[in-house]
């Protein structure tokens, strides 16, 4: 089983310097975490467009890989 992750450090130029990385076993879980994080920490809007774009950036890693 693989694990999905995304790293805020891959997105420089945001409103705040952020070094948070999020990971989950499923894309759905990760998406919810990313949406919450984006809204709370970056003032982003929860839009279908944002969800679609951010899911394309999810990276896949072996399950033993700890982010
Ligand atoms: Zn962040």
Image (cartoon, rainbow, N blue to C red):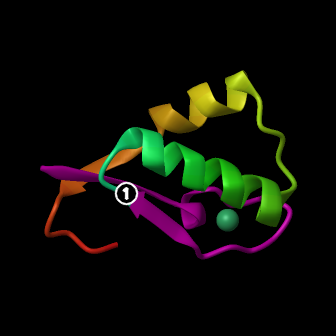
**Residue 48 at what x, y percent from top left?**
70, 23
Q: Give the residue pinned by disc 1.
A: 24
Residue 20 magenta? yes
Q: Residue at x 60, y 76 (%)?
A: 19
13 and 25: which is toward the camera: 25
Q: Which image quarter is the C terminus in?
A: bottom left
> Which residue appears at 40% of the width and 61% of the height?
23
Q: What residue is at 47 percent from the left and 50 percent from the top?
A: 30
Q: Tell me how many marks there are.
A: 1
Ligand 1 positioned in quadrant? bottom right
Q: Is mark 1 within 8 Å of ligand 1?
A: no
Q: Quadrant of residue 41?
A: bottom right
The x and y percentages for residue 3 are 26, 54
Find the magenta span and give its range: 1-23
Horizontal and vertical percent position of residue 53: 59, 30
- Magenta stretch contains residue 2: yes
Figure quadrant of residue 66: bottom left
Q: Is residue 12 or residue 37 the one in the foreground?
A: 37
Q: Hey, which quadrant is residue 10 in on the image?
A: bottom right
How would you rate the neighbour count of disc 1 (Cα within 10 Å): few for under 14, some for 14-19, many for 20 or more?
some
* Lateral position of residue 65 relative to residue 55, left or right: left
Residue visible at 35% across and 47% down? 59
**Residue 22 in picture, x, y percent from top left:** 48, 64
């Amino acid at each position: 089983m693989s694990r999905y992750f995304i790293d805020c450090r891959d997105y420089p130029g945001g409103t705040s310097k952020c070094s948070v990385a999020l990971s989950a076993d499923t894309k759905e879980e990760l998406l919810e975490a990313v949406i919450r994080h984006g809204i709370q920490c970056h003032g982003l809007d929860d839009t279908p467009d944002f969800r679609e774009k951010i899911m394309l950036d999810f990276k896949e890693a072996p399950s033993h890989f700890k982010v």
